[in-house]
Structures are given as C-alpha cells and as structure tokens.
Image: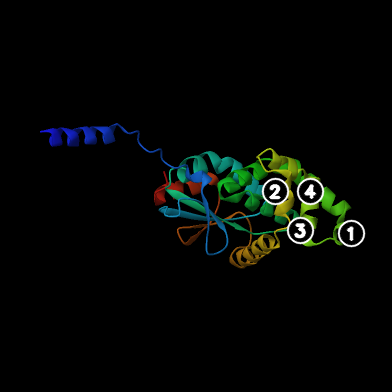
Amino acid sequence: MKRWLAVVLLILGFSALPARAAPDWTTVATKAASGAFVIGNPKAKVKLVEYLSYTCPHCAAFSVESAATLKGKFVKSGSTSIEVRNAVRDRVDLAAAQLARCAGPAGFSGATEAIFAQQQDWLPRAFDYDQINAARLAGYPIGAQLKKIATGAGLDALMRGRGMSDAAFAACFTDEAGIAAIATLSDASWKAVHGTPSFVLNGKPYEYKSWPDLETALRAAGAH
C-alpha cells in the first residue's frame, strides 16, 4: 500500500511540474553547408532560402513587410527555417553583412532586421562616406576599410544599441576569415540568382512577386 501511494505521489508530482516553454526559434541560427546562417529550427518542415543584399531597397522592404508573420509566427513556431545567403553588391553591403554575422547565432536575425529597418538612414551616409573617402580607403586592408565605412554610416551606433560593445565592433572587422567566407558565399549566390531578393522554397526556385504571394505559398507548404 505504501509503495502504491509513493508511486501515485510521484506521478502527481511530475504532472504538477510546469510545462517546458517552447523555444523561440527566431533566436537560433546555425551554419549551413553553404556557409550561410539558417535562422530557426534546423528540422523545420518548410525550408526557405533567401538571397539578399543589405544595400538592396527591395530586400529592406521585404524584411519590414514580412517580419511579423515570417519570423514572428512561421519561424518562431519551428515550422519554418530561413537560410540567409548573402549576394553582396558592394563593400558597403559587405560591411553590413559582416556586422550582422558578428552579432552571433542568437543575434543574427535581429541584427539583420534592424539593419534593414534603418536602411534609409544609414545607407545614404555610407555611400557618401565611401565616395568622399575612396582614395584614402584604398590604402587600408579590407577589414579596416569596412570598419571605417560602417562607422561613417552610423552602423556602429546601430549595433551598440543592440548590445554590441565597441571592442566587439572593432574585433568584427579584424576577422579576415569571416569576411572571406561572406565573399565566397556571395560568389556562389550570384551564380545561382540574378537579383535580390530571390528565394528557394523547399528546394525549388520560387518566382517572387510579393510578400502576400510568398506567404500563401509558405502556408500551403506547411508554415504556421
């Protein structure tokens, strides 16, 4: 009788434990074989590949329009993952791409959203700085060039607002291997697509027209 009572109490005790909270997959990023970051559940049923450029206005518009549903629902639920493949268009783009990746797996998605959300503010400053200082920048190593462009654009303040320290910001642009990895990824991207944003949905190229159309296709594939 005592043994039976102990078993019952043990079962009741386990049932009283609070349920484990579901993970927020938007804060999870892993490295794909391509070298790209995959945001979300690596085992998600719906796999979206996005080719993007941080200096692309259409990419920024897509990010802002889609974020609440694509990341806020589909990725967060674990039903969908996004593999972000850089298609770099210029060294301003490369500077932003390096910063986003330096935010680390937990911060990559949020950094990407923030960079796109404020693109209209920092991008004109970046191009102005790059143009005015082109001759002087040419004398610096690539990492130093990117750091100066990012600072001239105000991206240092943007990332500081997201918790990146000045030391981490400086260290980001000394990571020559990381910069080279983005360049390699970009070369492969431009062999696969002709513009940004471009998408592959569950292994098949998707002809992008608008976010509502893509949302419909994602839901049909199982995103929720």
CA gap between label 1 and label 2 equals: 27 Å
Mark 2 element type: helix
Q: Position of residue 99 (x, y in %)?
A: 68, 51
Instruction: Identify which residue, 204 or 187, lies in the foreground.
Output: 187
Circle 4 packing at 10 Å, graded few (<14), some (14-19), many (20+), is many
CA gap between label 1 and label 3 equals: 16 Å
Q: Residue at x 45, y 58 (%)?
A: 202
Q: Quadrant of residue 116?
A: top right
Q: Which residue is mark 3?
A: 143
Mark 3 element type: helix
Q: Which residue is mark 2?
A: 168
The numbered disc on residue 25 is none
- Closer to the chain start, of discs 4 and 2, is 4
| For discs 1 and 2, the disc positioned in front in the rendered view | 2
CA gap between label 3 and label 4 equals: 15 Å
Q: Position of residue 91 (x, y in %)?
A: 75, 57
Instruction: Identify which residue, 172 or 10, lies in the foreground.
Output: 10
180 relative to 200 in the view: left or right: right
